[in-house]
Image (cartoon, coloured by chain):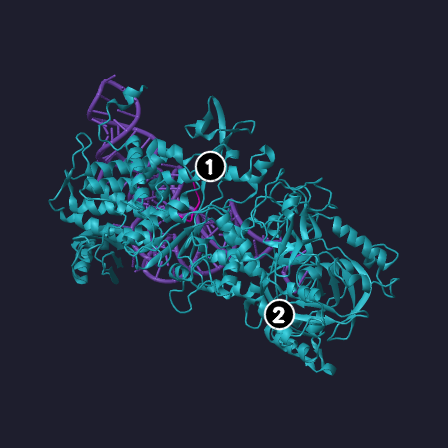
Amino acid sequence: MSEAAETADIPPFRYTAELAGEIEARWQDYWESHGTFNAPNPVGELADPEHPRAGAPKLHVQDMFPYPSGAGLHVGHPLGYIATDCYTRYKRMTGYNVLHPMGFDAFGLPAEQYAVQTGTHPRVTTETNIERYRQQLRRLGLAYDNRRSFATTDPEYYRWTQWIFLQIFNSWYDPQLRKARPIDELIAEFTSGRRPTPDGRPWSSLSPVEQRRIIDDHRLAYVSEAPVNWCPGLGTVLANEEVTPEGRSERGNFPVFKRNLKQWMMRITAYADRLLDDLDKLEWPEPIKLMQRNWIGRSTGAHIDFPTEVAPIRVFTTRPDTVFGATYMVLAPEHELVDRLVPDVWPEGTKPVWTGGHATPREAVDAYRKLAATKTDVERQAETKEKTGVFTGAYAVNPVTGGRIPIFVADYVLAGYGTGAIMAVPAQDERDWAFAEVFDLPIVRTVQPPADFAGKAYVGDGPAINSAAPDRGLDLNGLSVAEAKAKIIDWLEANGCGRGATTYRLRDWLFSRQRYWGEPFPIVYDEHGLPVALPESMLPVELPEVADFSPRTYDPDDADTDPETPLSRAKDWVEVELDLGDGPKRYVRDTNTMPNWAGSCWYELRYLDPDNDRCFVDPVNERYWMGPQFPGDCGGVDLYVGGVEHAVLHLLYARFWHKVLYDLGYVSSFEPFRKLFNQGYIQAYAYRDARGVLVPAAEVVERDGRYFHGDQEVFQEYGKMGKSLKNVVTPDEMCEAYGADTFRVYEMSMGPLDVSRPWETRAVVGSYRFLQRVWRLVVDEESGALRVVDAPADEETRRLLHRTIDGVRTDMENLRFNTAIAKLIELTNRVTRLSATPREVAEPLVLMLSPFAPHLAEELWQRLGYEGSLAYADFPIADPALLTAETVTYPVQVSGKVRARIDVPAEASEDEVRTAALAAVAGHLAGREPRKVIVVPGRMVSVVV
RNA sequence: GGGGAAGUGGCGGAAUGGCAGACGCGCACGGUUCAGGUCCGUGUGCCCGAGAGGGCGUGAGGGUUCAACUCCCUCCUUCCCCACCA
């Protein structure tokens, strides 16, 4: 087919991809040069009292910003961006001052790894990628306030990331007030003696270094020698969340080892309760809230101390009511008391199975620990229910029964949760039951199980049994689990052997990485090796130039190695002489960088005041865009849209930082994102040939339900769109073939926004035809003349228009764009059948279409005789009088089956409808008298015989 | 193992107690065209029937109701999250 043949028959004024491209470029230029989507701030450089929306009610909508990868965007990426664009364009037309910004989360490993491979500086790669993203997004006509755009890698941005880090570093958590406070206030409490020192010595008797260590231990950001996930293959430590269940690195799939290393930690656990409780204030999808609740994992119960010969063992239990059934104890292999407890010889009464075949307890414990340490998590996984362990040779005393109970070491008890020790109650815990069976330990039921519970643990509710110690003044028998818990906690507290307690699954956040392409810490170390904050005037601490961007990596299996960061090799940068208040001294910089998450922990705030160089956001601007809307409101972004993969980490970290900033008085909102919406994913078909090799999806053709690549039959599968599946479709291709407006309409009409669905390029043409029909309603394809007439529309068209307006408004408010578009298509299809288009329909149709197809709408709006942009035009309002049809068709059911339809005037009374209905179905009644006739006004009639 | 979400035509989906399948893709037929494509029109859940019409139908089974895709119970399947958390 020749170019000439292709275009020869096409009318000169048809809405083609070429025309769409021309219109789109023109309006994108217009919007940019007019700053059409700039949103005015109340104060500061972005304030604009002349703006049409200055002082209007605000709406702050935000997308989860992208990491600008080298591959560029595919059609799945902008789904959420288009959705928020449609929503904000709509809300702008209903009078809101809309803030809709976009930025880039640009620190990260891919640019760094590319740098390692090619020597290209990550900044160069990053900036190239960002530029590409900007162009791709611009082409989609997304209505951003571009003055507010930034990348987390901009020194002017990460200056404030570092500044916030310092606020966190210079804070402590006051559990009484349940909030973070400046560290100076803690120092003042110690100095005045209001707060005792940890070991009771007077504050003034401590050396300055001792004082600093105590203070440092209270900071919300602190350096800790803690067990971390060391990954020699990557040369870096990883957060727990970055380690797979198999005990390998999420990136690279290298082995990960638990090592004690000095690392920055964030005391997010101090906020566990607030992070949990404030979920109730948020309009988030329940599944996401649940995931956060599970992640925080609050359990309430008690700490109980079990005396031993060396020191009491403290356990955490959620079932203190079952303490009478505690017939043995288990310590995690890493528990600090293990070494002190182990005696020289096996005591009297040691069962052979307890010893693991070893001659002494010491030997047995050492061997077991060694085994546990070398076992990877894969192996532990494989033997999930197989309980292993070994007797320590030591006994503890059950504080309520006074009985001696053996102490075991077993890896089913985790060092990192609770106290790393448990009281084992086999009768009421399935794991303990399994262990007790293996090691032949006594089982004492303390909750009466139902009849069919012989031979297994019973974890449910029931009356307590075998739970009395009259000589100790304790009797739980007959009480329910809840009652027994309350009573035993009172008893434990009164007798000094325990107290009510709460523990969390959430751990403190490991906050340093041994990478190059991240924010440097604004911290130096002095001659004592203690951290010292750099003053604000020294921010930002910029990344030094280095020759080699990679951390030192090792044999992936060699755990006995130490991190060596890229920054540590920049000797001139690392060693500095500074005057930090007590004269010029030599300091050493921190050579770690912050994790990827840092930049996204507060970016929602920087959009509000992106150029402010006095503070990270002006409080007035923050209060306007994010502040509480009513008493008790948490405030925050009004709508935050992004993928469900950030359900826990990003959203938890960002909430944490936001709460610290709130406590310190910098923001008026105590949650960053009031409402969250998770968009689904666009997935795509991929094809493999008979050998299992992927073939490019674009080259596959379907014939009779089978798929072929050339002559070869290939087989369809379904998955994420990506290079690896050879099924990428880019927005640029779609813009080229159909125009950006068609692409936008297609993405929004595919289905509900929160559901994942497959991309089908061949279906895009439906949206294209729709826009062509709308174009034709307004513009004559042959002459280019306006087809719009001022004569009024017929009554039914007018009523359909108003029902459409009403329905579209509801759909837009609820982000149901697919049904909104369906309604617009229905209206369009009706008007298409008219010989000319009434202006009273054309104008509202164009306005309603404009959020989805903004370029086309702007063009038609202009052709309809308006000047400038329709971005601030009023969205159509339905006339309530026209929302019903003139006549209503009622289906008439007899015994649940539709037997007739009747047309009655909309204003007909219920009796008139009933009479008409009965007449219509008389034949089906066969003379029987209806028992009941139900008339649902405007809906249907149901006759019961 | 625990938790969550979801199962509707050939496909994406619509209907949240009231006409199941809106809207779109695909497909079929017709118009336009030398032809293909485009565009326009009509039809399109399945079965019986020439037709009028009738029967069946929202993963399976049961229940509530005049009326169930929708609410309740049991089960099956798929996807996602967590996973020895005391």
Magenta span has A756? Answer: yes
Q: Do tags 2 and 1 sit on the same chain?
A: yes
Q: Chain A is drawn in which colour?
A: cyan
- Left or right for A589, reference A847: right
Q: Judge by depth and name the residue closer to the eye, A556 or A177.
A: A177
Q: Which amino acid does label 1 sit on?
A: Gly
**Numbered circle sitting on residue A72:** 1
Depth order, front residue of A343/A744: A744
**Residue located farthest toward the front when viewing the structure as drawn:** A583
**Could you tell me the amino acid type at mark 2?**
Ile
Residue B7 position, x and y percent, is 43, 47
- Seen as rendered, the residue at the extreme left is A791
Q: Which of A451 and A37 is in front in this view?
A: A37
A230 sits left or right of A522 in the view: right
Please provide the residue range marked out in magenta. A752-758
Is residue A88 inside the magenta stretch?
no
Dot 2 alpha-carbon crowd within 10 angstroms: few under 14, some 14 to 19, many 20 or more: some
Report whether A869 appears left or right of A599: left
Q: In which quarter of the view is residue A489 placed? A: bottom right
Q: Can residue A93 be seen in this view?
A: yes
N-terminal-most mark, 2 or 1: 1
**Residue to which mark 2 is pinned:** A187
Quadrant assignment, res A452? bottom right
